[in-house]
Image (cartoon, grey):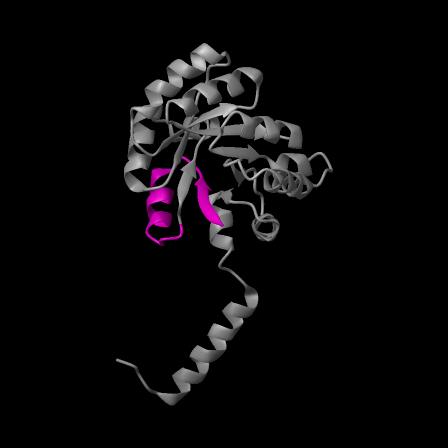
Amino acid sequence: MKFFVDTADIDEIRELSETGMLDGVTTNPSLMAKTGRPMLDVLKDICAAVDGPVSAEVTATDSDGMLREGRHLRELADNIAIKVPLTWDGLKACRQLTSEGTMVNVTLCFSANQALLAAKAGATFVSPFVGRLDDLNLNGMDLIEDIRTIYDNYPAFTTEILVASIRNPNHVSEAALIGADVATVPPQVLRQLAQHNLTDKGLAAFLADWEKTGQKIV
């Protein structure tokens, strides 16, 4: 599974990129607004910090406007993926941008039928939002299972399942067990993947025993 980080904070992105664990970045207008900086400047910095896809979301809601914005955004860097909403206009824009060789992330997916349409439109990624479904007392991972089954039924589909709206480490492991291609994770959740109380306790015990020996490795 590939790990994308869901943030526009360039300091977070640079730090996580140094671990070698980061395969890409997803952003959205809300995350961009939090930076207090011009969107294009932020995107240029992010694209320079990571080699993988960087999702940049359009704000137009009609297909012509999405195409204008998407074509402008893709000129920023070779690793830009244009993010469009899963609407009819978004699907039309996706089909056109894909035909032009542009990576496209179709976002705000909440049903298997929507994911099927995204694949038909040639999306590079489809982003089902599991956390927001959980908020409605639905099981977001059921949607990931359904999409995985549908895509596996049709080998011609090349769209990758990019699990979004991840709230906790369990979402990541469940998505990996199902066979999702990508998880886009908030920085704090990505760091939590390496944490376990038994790891901390074991390390503390090892170090305490080593201290008693009075030895040093170097």
Q: Which residue is drawn at the image coordinates 33% and 36% (left, top)? A: 46
Q: Is residue 48 left or right of residue 98?
A: left
Looking at the rendered image, the quarter that the C terminus falls into is bottom left
The span shown in magenta is 1-21
Q: Position of residue 128 (x, y in %)?
A: 58, 35
Q: Would you place residue 126 above or below residue 192 in this image?
A: above
Q: Would you place residue 164 above or below residue 214 in this image?
A: above
Residue at the left extreme of this rendering: 218
Which residue is at the front of the view, 216 or 41?
41
Q: Could you say which quadrant of the image residue 161 lies in?
A: top right
Give the number of callouts.
0
Q: Could you say which quadrant of the image residue 110 lies in?
A: top right
Residue 132 belongs to the span the image colors magenta = no
Q: Which residue is drawn at the image coordinates 46% and 47% (left, top)? A: 2
Residue at the bottom extreme of this rendering: 213
Is residue 46 among what the camera can see? yes
Q: Position of residue 122 (x, y in %)?
A: 49, 28
Q: Which residue is drawn at the image coordinates 38% and 44% (left, top)? A: 12
Q: Which residue is drawn at the image coordinates 51% and 35% (left, top)? A: 159
Q: Is residue 91 left or right of residue 82?
A: right
Q: Position of residue 6 (x, y in %)?
A: 46, 39
Is residue 38 among what the camera can see? no
Residue 7 belongs to the span the image colors magenta = yes
Which residue is at the front of the view, 46 or 159?
159
